Image (cartoon, rainbow, N blue to C red):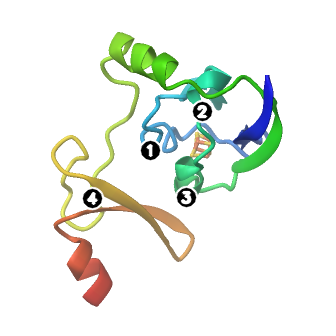
Amino acid sequence: MVARTIVKIDEELCDGCGVCISPCAEGALVLENGKAKVIREELCDGAGVCLAVCPTGALSLEVREAAEFSEIAVEKHLASQPRTYIPQNCSLCGTSEDDSCLIAYKHKGQSQWCCTRCLPRLIHG
Ligand code: SF4
């Protein structure tokens, strides 16, 4: 155990939408009994990419004693689970994240996704 940054989930605020599962490249987040959960501490690197997409503000980062992040554990975990995410689509053209890289952004309180092909349109209108 080490003191480090790790994702914190407020179960009162989590509505189980599952939107945070996909952005986690390490597959550290799962839905369990309708709530997001860090499946194993060693899988969460504390980068906080998931925070941007949570529509309810249930996700935050905290510094606490936790198992050390392990890239080896992540590799094994991802290899054992072919898909640990719910595919999201670009809000502008509908392209799936399985076909293009998607970037999360927020607009008027809504969490949205934009594929790299639509990014110039998002930036320049
Ligand atoms: S995005 Fe937020 S509300 Fe949705 S499952 Fe994840 S933590 Fe819960």
Q: Residue 44: which disc?
A: 2
Crowd band around label 4 with a 10 angstrom C-alpha radius: few (<14), some (14–19), many (20+): many
Residue 29 location (% of width, % of height): 55, 30
**Element under label 1?**
loop
**Element under label 4?**
loop
- Looking at the rendered structure, the kind of residue marked 2 is Cys
Between label 3 and label 2, give the one nearer the viewer.
Answer: 2
Residue 20 location (% of width, % of height): 52, 43
Q: Is residue 76 shown left or right of residue 47?
A: left
In the displayed structure, would residue 62 be above or below residue 31? below
What's the CA distance linking mark 3 and mark 4? 15 Å
- Looking at the rendered structure, the kind of residue marked 3 is Ala
Q: Residue 93 sits in which quadrant?
A: bottom left
Q: Which residue is mark 4?
A: 90
What's the CA distance linking mark 1 and mark 2? 12 Å
Q: Which residue is mark 3?
A: 52
Between label 1 and label 2, give the one nearer the viewer.
Answer: 2
Q: Residue 70 sits in which quadrant?
A: top right
Q: Which residue is mark 1?
A: 23
**Mark earlier in primary sequence (3, 4):** 3
**Mark earlier in primary sequence (3, 1):** 1
Count of picture labels: 4
What's the CA distance linking mark 1 and mark 4? 13 Å
Location of ligand 1 given as a quarter of the image: top right
**Element under label 2?**
loop
- Looking at the rendered structure, the kind of residue marked 1 is Pro
Whether residues under marks 1 and 4 lie with C-beta atoms below 8 angstroms apart, the answer is no
**Mark earlier in primary sequence (1, 2):** 1
Whether residues under marks 1 and 2 lie with C-beta atoms below 8 angstroms apart, the answer is no
Crowd band around label 2 with a 10 angstrom C-alpha radius: few (<14), some (14–19), many (20+): many
**Mark earlier in primary sequence (1, 4):** 1
